[in-house]
Image (cartoon, helix red, strand yellow):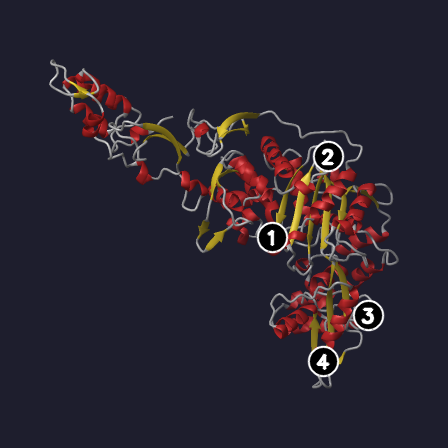
Amino acid sequence: MNSVNLGANTLGVQAASKKYFNKDVSELTLSEASVIAGITQNPSGYNPITHPDKNAKRREKVLNNMKDQGYISKAQYDEAMADDVYSRIAEYNTTGSGSVNTYFIDALIDNVFDDLTAAGYSETEAYKLIYKGGLTIKSTQDLTMQTICDEEANNPSNYPSDAKYSFQLSFEVKKADGSYKTYTNQTMLSFYKKKTNNDDFSINYSSPDECNAAIAQYEQDVLEEGDSIVEGSEAVNITLEPQVAMTVIDQSTGEVKALVGGRGDKSGNRTWNRATDTCRQPGSTFKIIGCYAAALDAGGKTLASVQDDAPFTVGSKTFNNYDKSFGGFTSIRWAITKSINIVTVKTLQDIGVELGYKYAEDFGISTLTDSDKNLSLALGGLTKGVTNLELTGAYATIANGGVYLEPKFYTQVLDHDGNVLLDKTTTQDTRTVIKDTTAWLLTDAMKDVLTQGTGKLARFDSQIAQAGKSGTTTSNRDCLWAGYTPYYTCVVWGGYDDNSKQSGKLTSYPKNIWRNAMSRIHEGLETKDFVQPDGITNTTVCSKSGLVPLEGTCDNDPRGSMLTTEYFDTDTVPTDSCDHHVALEICADSGAIAGPYCPNKTSKVFITGAVSGSPEYEFMADDTFMNTVCTLHDATSLINSSPTTTDPTNSGTTPGSTDGTAAGAQTGGAETGSGAGSGAGTSGSGSGSSGAGASGSGGTDTGSSGSSGNTHR
């Protein structure tokens, strides 16, 4: 049904719903749905614009069949039949027929219509007011910005050189036996996938002429002897690919300044608007919206918080990073900068899917469903996807210090007498989604994306601060750049209308468009940075734990110092000490934890808490190692390696000493509270034993196979 010819050069139920009623198919009334259902058998003859009388007969038949088969009640039938639906269609489709509106104007009309009906006007009344009521609509559009965006969205140099063309196709065939069959671009694709035994077969071509030739060949391939194409049933729409959507919002007001719903020629009014009508997967741009905003704001996480970037499976689902590599203990800041999937998923798992979902809704994402309440939410793997407009509104919320302002296309609508009918200055939806400190921290991390991470190509040459996040989906079917400055927020989406795969090397065009458009939009504006709110501080932490560093330990990691400086909300500054580093005294001869008799000891720093498969694992001191003490050296080996002197007043013999008390003090002091330390004391005289016991009980840990006493700050 997404490709069937439904008249007026309209293919698919969704497009017909938009064309005839200016609404999503899910919003159609029974009366309206029956109009569209009545078109199918003869798209030109039952067109409700040009042949409303013929369509009305078909519509009545559809409704009668539904009533007779029990799908609707008599009351529902009567209500639908009483609806003056054709007057509404005529009002809506005869106005402005001589000119083609821009995508922004289409969206503006949609917005005003929705608000009028929400204010109590009937749909017919709203149409009449918009098209014949002499309304004054105060638009938020900036014509200069709109021109810039249109030019950059249609600039071939921003795109891969091998542009393609796709098409929507529908035609009706009268079979030799008198039956009818509909063929579409989808049946064409299925036909050739099967014929060529190639699931990756594509019907995207290098030129419109190639599209038309392919369509002609398909018609020839499916027509059998005695078949004929029904006159007037064929409809073809050829589209330049890849396509694009783009929205620019002034985050301080929520005003939509420019909007692009597609590239190439716009053939008519109320055609499909990819910025407002199309829901596509947001990819990694959703990591901020569905995970990190919630994590920093209410999930107890900071930009310094770490996850072990290592192989990760939950149930039957295995998560991977885009490059299939792993980084070990990785901070949230670096995960944002480099768009690391596993860190994001583990973070959402920590804070809870419900929390991430709630924040995404608060950001203005209206297309979420209960089926999105899973860990894929962190990566933008959504059931329906999001619109470009709503994603731009979500990022504008962060740019606006955490305050959501409903995106608006107008400020006021006045009737022909100057009376205010609609006033967005008083009715605009607004709410605080995240703390201003959270917004600033996210922004600071996303500034790094443009200088060190996946967004370097998006940065335009200016001292004006810029922040943003990239996004791609499986097989690069969607590619996005969501970014903002202290002035404006802009999100650019790119992809094929039919969701075809794109080469990973050819998906940078949203960044090109964003960079070039935003550079021009910001010409002449004052240099500005994002204002740091009160409640932000910075401090030094260990980059392997995000916690207070252990002196002499975190800065002596075998790979170098792991100390780093990070920004924090003053309420979330870490107070716990690093739990991923440990310093141990190691026997230089055996490589095991040193015992009391090891003559040559060195201090070495190890990692703790890493999982198997993590790059940290080679630096790890696991439980087995931590509970094993050197067995190479004992009291005998120490005697053999050192001169022994005997004190006549002492019945015990102490290696390298003339005082029996020294052995106990030395052993107990060297090994804080180990079992080996206590044993060493008993080998001397009574005073030596006392020395060992005193040192043992005074250590940081007592009695665990001689190992716990080897843990040092």
Which residue position is annotated with label 3?
51
Amino acid type, residue under disc 2 in the picture: Tyr
- Of marks 3 and 4, the one in the foreground: 4
- Of marks 2 and 3, the one in the foreground: 2
- Of marks 2 and 1, the one in the foreground: 1
Which residue position is annotated with label 1?
473
Q: Quadrant of residue 599?
A: top left
Please state if 392 lies on the left or on the right of 303 as rendered: right
Question: Which of the marked residues, 2 or 4, is nearer the chain's N terminus?
Answer: 4
Whether residue 8 is visible here, answered yes or no, is no
Question: Which of the marked residues, 2 or 3, is nearer the chain's N terminus?
Answer: 3
Please state if 252 lies on the left or on the right of 476 as rendered: right
Which residue position is annotated with label 4?
223
Q: Position of residue 412 (x, y in %)?
A: 79, 41
Q: Quadrant of residue 662?
A: top left
Q: Secondary structure at mark 3?
A: loop
Task: Give the distance between the C-alpha atoms of the residues marked 1 and 4, in whole angstroms.
Answer: 38 Å
Task: Give the distance between the C-alpha atoms of the residues marked 3 and 4, in whole angstroms.
Answer: 29 Å
Q: Secondary structure at mark 4?
A: loop
Q: Secondary structure at mark 2?
A: loop
